[in-house]
Amino acid sequence: MTADIAELGEPVWDARSLTSTPVEFELIGPPSALDYPELCARCAAPASRRLLIERVFERRRKNARWEYVVAGARVPFCEGCIAQHDCERPPISFLRRLLLCFRAGAIIPVVTSGALAIFFASEALGAIGEDNAIAVAALTAFSSFLALIAAICLRVAWEKSRRFAVPEPSSVTAAFDFSDDLSELFDSERRRYRLANMPFAKALDRMNRGRIWDAASRVAKRAHRMRTVLAVVFVVACLVVWLRNLFQF
Ligand SMILES: [Zn+2]
């Protein structure tokens, strides 16, 4: 599917920027696979560390239901820009992140199996007092099994609720934006990047030259030919079925 790049805020302009117009280009591969220059993506100052930038994309599945895909990458920024970002988007606490699992609708098995695990663990403790070794072993094993199920369910709920934990872009992280996967059938994954800082964009472009998407490349043309062949085969197959029904042969 084709997804539009989200609107960015005002492009960043500083003495090292060569233009105030965001730069766009398409690169092959997921954002996490790119090579990044050690420059701040917002102001091109030397980067001190990386920020996780994530975006949520809606995709319509064959059964007409929506699915949400989170894509992200760790992008370099300078200390000043990171401080600005933290001010605008304070890091989410573990408790709040845990509560977000409820929004995914997959938390009930976690609560149920977790409560049962605690119940059987307390029963095992009671059996220790009664000096019943077999009951202790059986209750401990069952409690551990339920705890394992609770942990697996929590992991699933955590992943399902991941999209709720993705913050809106700050004025800092908006300097680096990317689209959903734009590839078509037989293509490799590719995304459009929209960068607000020209020196950073140039450095990123230089370091990922082999990933620049070229619609006129041999690989792209071959994928296009394969799609065309597939479309022709589909049309011919439909025609044959239609003629067969028409003439009853
Ligand atoms: Zn910066």
Image: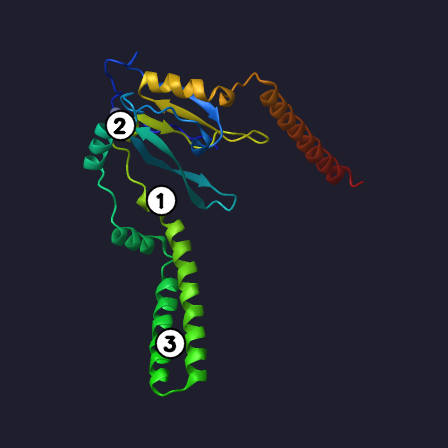
Say what amino acid the circle numbered 3 marks.
Phe
Q: Counting residues from the N terminus, which is met first, the one under dot 2 or under dot 1?
A: 2
Q: Quadrant of residue 8?
A: top left
Q: Position of residue 55 (x, y in %)?
A: 36, 36
Residue at disc 1, secondary structure: helix
Residue at disc 3, secondary structure: helix
In three-dimensional space, the C-alpha distance between marks 2 and 3, rounded to whole angstroms, equals: 51 Å
Q: Are marks 2 and 3 in contact (CB under 8 Å)?
A: no
Q: Residue at x 40, y 60 (%)?
A: 151
Q: Residue at x 56, y 29 (%)?
A: 187
> Disc 1 marks which residue?
163
Say what amino acid the circle numbered 2 marks.
Cys
Disc 2 within 8 angstroms of ligand 1 (CB): yes
Q: Position of residue 222 (x, y in %)?
A: 63, 23
Quadrant observed for ligand 1 in the rendered image? top left
Q: Point out which mark residue 120 bears.
A: 3
Residue at disc 2, secondary structure: loop
Closer to us: 190 or 79: 79
Going by the image, does 143 lie left or right of 48? right
Say what amino acid the circle numbered 1 marks.
Arg
In three-dimensional space, the C-alpha distance between marks 2 and 1, rounded to whole angstroms, equals: 26 Å
> Disc 2 marks which residue?
78
Q: Residue at x 38, y 16 (%)?
A: 202
Q: Quadrant of residue 58?
A: top left
Disc 1 within 8 angstroms of ligand 1 (CB): no
Q: Counting residues from the N terminus, which is met first, the one under dot 2 or under dot 3?
A: 2
Residue at the outermost top position: 18
Q: Position of residue 11 (x, y in %)?
A: 27, 20
Position of residue 194 relative to residue 62, above or below, is above
Closer mark to the observer between disc 2 and disc 1: 2
Q: Position of residue 145 (x, y in %)?
A: 45, 69
Closer to us: 179 or 141: 141
